[in-house]
Amino acid sequence: MRALGVDLGSKRIGIAVSDRSGTIASPLTMVPRSGNRKLDHKRIAALVVEEEAEVVVVGLPLNMNGTVGPAATAAIAEAEALATVVGVPVQTFDERRTTVTADAVLIELRMKAPARRRVVDKVAAAVMLQSWLDRRSAAR
């Protein structure tokens, strides 16, 4: 099953995609926020079609104690809106610390701050999507 991972940010939306077997996630692209949520969702829907994704996994920014706060509530609402556009199931998945993990990996690769800012969102989406893939695989 091919999955598209989405890391919703206020300025950028990180996008990752799995391989066709649903085993490995890779960073794909970053969609800059346009200020128009419907337009942003249409861009994601186009990526779903282009990548032949069968499911969209949206990062859910839970509080560190696992509770749902304002950011998670907003992500759930946006995931529900996205589900009306993409034509495939949309799921949410815990994304706590994915950006921190992605940034640490990029620092380890000795990437300078300006370059990191350009890719951290799609790398964070890949970290989140890989966790979702691993959990799905372990449940089988």
Image (cartoon, grey):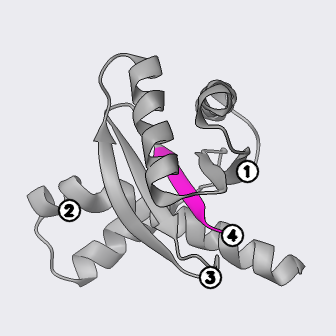
Q: Amino acid at mark 1?
A: Asn
Sort mark 3 into few (<14), some (14-19) or many (20+) by Cα contacts within 10 Å: some
Q: CA distance from mark 3 to mark 2?
A: 25 Å
The residue lying at 52 percent from left, 60 percent from top is 97
Query: SS for tag 3?
Result: loop
Which is closer to the viewer, label 3 or label 2?
A: 3
Of residue 44 and residue 71, the one placed in the foreground of this image is 44
The answer to whether residue 65 is left or right of residue 112 is: right
Q: Is residue 9 visible?
A: no
Query: SS for tag 2?
Result: helix
Q: CA distance from mark 2 to mark 4?
A: 30 Å
Q: Amino acid at mark 2?
A: Arg
The residue lying at 44 percent from left, 48 percent from top is 47
Q: CA distance from mark 3 to mark 4?
A: 9 Å
- Range shown magenta: 1-7
The quarter of the image holding the C terminus is: bottom right
Q: Disc 2, disc 4: CB below 8 Å?
A: no
Circle 1 sits on which residue?
A: 65
